[in-house]
Structures are given as structure tokens and as C-alpha cells.
Amino acid sequence: MSAEPLPMAGEAPADPAALEEMKAEVRGLAADRGAVILAHNYQVPEVQDVADFVGDSLALSQKAAKVDEPVIAFCGVHFMAETASILAPDKTVLLPDHDAGCSLADSITPEQLADWQSRHPGAITVMYVNTTAAIKALTDYCCTSSNAKAVVEHVIAEHGPDVEILFGPDMFLGAYVQKTTGHANMRIWDGECHVHAGIRPSDITEVRAEYPGAEFLIHPECGCVTSVMEYVAAGDVDAENVQMLSTGGMMKYAEMAEADQKGRQVIVATETGMLYPLSQAAPDVEFIPANREASCRYMKMITLEKLRDSLRDMTGEVKVAPELAERARLPIERMVSITA
Ligand code: 13P
Ligand code: SF4
């Protein structure tokens, strides 16, 4: 594995002075428009730098539900901006590029979900937040990677140990949650995120050989989750050195690692944008991507320039139709209230 810096996509000016000027322009526009800038951990560095708040899906939803400002400039992907609009219907939510979609959200349609539910009457539907508003409107509980296990445990506590659960659309997260909750009566949709699914067991084998003794941070959407759990079960990897975490959980781990001991090596299995906030939070820890190619082209569609244009022209509004938003709100509110 080469030690070259990871490519950071974007259309930000290459000249550092011009870049700082554009960042100042964006901050000025945000103040003029009464906008709060929310950014996901996978956003390009210069977008994270101008954001008021950077976080994971759950934290961004919680933040969106509480903002005072009239405008939310959302730097993430479409389903996240929709979720913000559903939770904050009186705010103007801007998404600087509407093509910023999600392959995981695209892996289930409302027709497919309705058909699945019709074949399992009485089952409780738990959907990962990476879904469209139309899917959420058919869902009982949403969850994110940081609270998926807690949501499923909540459903079991509320509906009894035999409750049938339809979990989707991410099959790797579903398998992880089923394994950690031990809930057998759970059916899992076979969707995946092309970026995380592409982080394979072979990547882990290679990176482990190169960095023996390194710790692991693994996003539960990854295609390597099952094999890492098998390494742990076989005693091949020390369980204490492996954490399955949301991107927000990884940030907390990084802060703890920085405070605890310098010079640690930590292998990170998730989208490579994560390396930037982790290194900011823990400059003395060496973070190593499990797969350097794991970059989400949708997340990288949001650039500083597009954010500037969106704030300047007040373009790119995402608005969920009120009737649909009404139905989608309940499962999202349940998600927001259940923390791990
Ligand atoms: P979290 O930020 O919730 O961990 O989700 C990762 C992701 O893939 C979002 O697209
Ligand atoms: Fe969707 Fe995967 Fe990109 Fe996240 S990383 S936005 S799940 S395609």
C-alpha cells in the first residue's frame, strides 16, 4: 500500500489564498441568508471546514430537528436532505447538487417494500435511514448505523421476543444487527452500498499483513464485516482491537485514542472521506484506509463552489410533500429518540 495522500475530489480553487477567499465568501453568504451549514463526515475537506456542524447521519438528523436558523444548507446526499426537511418542515433545506444520490437508497423501491410487507403481515419494518421518503412512509422504525442494534432491541422489547422484523435495505448492517442481537426472526433485504460493499475480506487480510497489531474501525455497511467477526470469533484478531462503528462513533474513538496514547495505528474500513475528520480530531494517531478506492462519488458531488452558488442564489431546495412528510416523520422521530 502506498503512503501517497488520498485524492480529495472537488472543484475548490487549488491556490490556497483563493480557497480561503471562497471559504470566507461561503461563510459570509451563510450569515446573510440566516443559514446553518450541516455536513456529513464524508464531505470533501473544504466543505467540512466551512460547516457549522459535521457529523454522522443520526447526529445530522438530530441537529436538523433543532436548528433555529431559517435555512439549512445540507452538505450530504439527497435522502439526508429529505430527512432534514421532514424533521424541519418550516425551514428551507438546500442541497447544492440534487444528483447527490445513494446506491443503497436506490436498492429498494416502495413497490418492492409493499410487496415484501404483504408477504409478511404483522411484521415490523425497520429501515436504515439511507432510504427515500417514500420508503420511510411505509416504515415503522428508521435507524442509522449508530443505533441500529438499539432500535431492533427496542422493537423486541415493545413487540415481544418472537416479533418478525423486516430489516433493510443494507444486508451487511442487517447481518451485523442480527448477529449482535441474536434475533432469529429477522428477514434482511439484499441491498448494499457499492462503496462499503467494495471493502472486501481480502482488503482486511492485506492490510492486516501490512500493519500487524493495528486496531480496526469498521463501518457495519462494509462487505468485510462478517469476515472480521469470524476472525474475532476464531481468536485470530483480538476482540478489543475491533470496533464496529458509525462514522460518529469513529470520531469519538479517535478523540479517545488521541487522549489516551500517541502513535497508535488504526485501520479504517469506510468511505475514505472519513480520514480527514479523524486526522483532524487525532493528529497523533495514524489512520490507514482499508481500501483506498472506497470513495463515494455522490458525497463528492457537493463542492465548495456548488455550496457557494446554492447559498448565493438560494437554489437546490429539497422539499418533501406535506402528506408524504407526515407519514415519513414518525419512523424518523422514533429513530432520533433512540440512541445507542
Ligand atoms: P453514518 O454516518 O450514519 O455512519 O452513515 C454512513 C453512510 O454511509 C452515510 O451515507
Ligand atoms: Fe450511499 Fe454508500 Fe455513498 Fe453512503 S457511501 S451515501 S451509503 S452510496
Image (tube, rainbow, N blue to C red):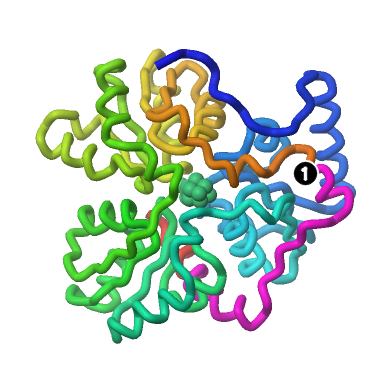
Q: Circle 1 sits on which residue? A: 306
Residue 326 sits inside the magenta stretch: yes
Which percent across, then down, holds residue 273?
54, 34
Q: What stretch is highlighted in magenta?
A: 307-333
Mark 1 secondary-structure assignment: helix
Along the viewing direction, whichever of 275 and 113 lies nearer the viewer? 113
Q: In this view, does 208 lie to the left or right of 325?
A: left
Quarter residue 174 falls in: bottom left
Image quadrant containing the C terminus: bottom left
| Left or right: where 96 falls relative to 83 | right
**Magenta stretch prevailing secondary structure:** helix
* Rendered-image quadrant of the N terminus: top left
Q: Give the total of numbered labels.
A: 1
Residue shown at 79% from the left, 61% from the top: 70
Instruction: Give neighbour class at mark 1: few <14, some 14-19, many 20+ (Cα, 10 Å).
Output: many
Mark 1 CB lies closer than 8 A to ligand 2: no
Quarter of the image for residue 162 reads bottom left
Residue 69 lies within the magenta run: no
